[in-house]
Amino acid sequence: MLHSSDTLFMGLFNQLPEPRLVIKPNAPDFTIVTVNVAYAVATGYAAQDLAGQSLWKVFGSNTASSNVKEIFEQGLNDVLLHKTEMKLPIFRYDISATSASRLKPRWWQVDISPVNDDNGDIAYLLCTTRNVTIHVEDQMQILRGSQEQAAMLINQQDRDEQIKILQGQLVEATENTEEQVNRRTQNLSDSEYELSRLFAVTPVGLCILKGSQFVIQKANKPMLALWGRKQQDVTGRPLLEVFPELKGQPFPALLEKVVADKKMLTLTAQPILIVQGDGKPVKIFVDFSYDPLFNTAGNVEGVLVTFNDVTESVDAQQILQNRQEELETLNEELNAANEELMRINQELNILNNSKK
């Protein structure tokens, strides 16, 4: 187990380029164990000021989003419950460059990962913090640029009255720019968070394939267990590169059909041969569905794959069917034996009557 007092650990921890903090899994307090140098530089908090403090005593006063604490706490509890990494929605948390300067808007995204001890229990929670302010401000700049182009068009109009009306609309749109960007950013981030939670809690295999080569973007634990692979072995790679054995099977063609038809496809108890991570080919039976994922233009940009391993059920049905067939064969043999006994009895009766 890693300890914050371990000199080697702290040396490596402080060299990490992304801001990180380590938290105890002692809900609901979630006590801060330590932070790295990058976190101190990004936030202005020193490790000695944070160590031993509840996360909620430090975090919250500068938040511009009202529900940040609830989302953060839910994410921490989800990681404890499902023992899997969780990506939180983007949120606003304002900080000042110095103690005397005023707060400046900052946008952040946090990944929470469990750190297990030798017994497989969660010993710590590692929070990786990313400053995404520049990306949010880029979106604002794009909207402002569109409005500046609209202003140039307004100045080319001939009628003063129409110019005044359009300029008034431009002023109103400018005032709403930040609110629009905030809402758009929050909605996108919330959707990503809900998808992350869905992948974490769903007991059947899920994965998302993107593009014409069906690149694996994300897969949950049941799907990785079915594949016999780790997340880093499959993420960002085309499906047929990871599983070349699928080329002779119907699944790639079915994926292409879903993209072309823009319709969901569901099949049950389908046999599939995959080569797992240990190199052994395994034949299993699955219920699966392919759901097309659409972009804002209405085009299919990916496919959500749902797999459920029903091999045990199919094997049980096959055993039952085999036993029924054996029973039918045995009944036929018994019927034939009974008919033979009846024939022999008839012959004996005829023989006895002839002797009389």
Image: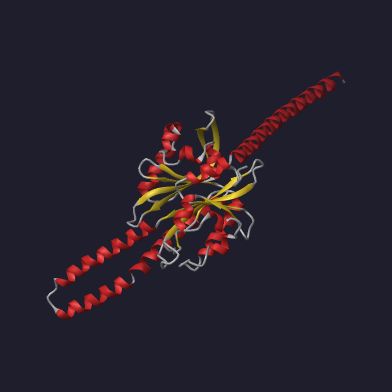
Residue 306 in sight in this render: no
* Residue lying farthest to the top in this orientation: 355
Q: Is residue 145 left or right of residue 305?
A: left
* Residue lying farthest to the bottom in this orientation: 161
Which residue occupies 25% across, 77% down? 168
Which residue occupies 60% across, 49% down? 124
- Quadrant that contains the C terminus: top right
Q: Is residue 197 left or right of residue 142?
A: right
Q: How many marks?
A: 0
* Residue lying farthest to the right in this orientation: 356
Residue 22, horizontal then vertical, whole percent: 56, 51
- Asked if 106 appears above or below 310 in the picture, the reply is below
* Residue lying farthest to the left in this orientation: 158
Residue 352, horizontal then vertical, whole percent: 85, 21
Scheme by which the image is coloured: secondary structure
Residue 136 in sight in this render: yes
The foreground one among 123 and 203 is 123
Q: Is residue 356 left or right of residue 313?
A: right
- Asked if 24 appears above or below 316 in the picture, the reply is below
- Quadrant that contains the N terminus: top right
Residue 104, horizontal then vertical, whole percent: 40, 65
Residue 30, horizontal then vertical, whole percent: 60, 57
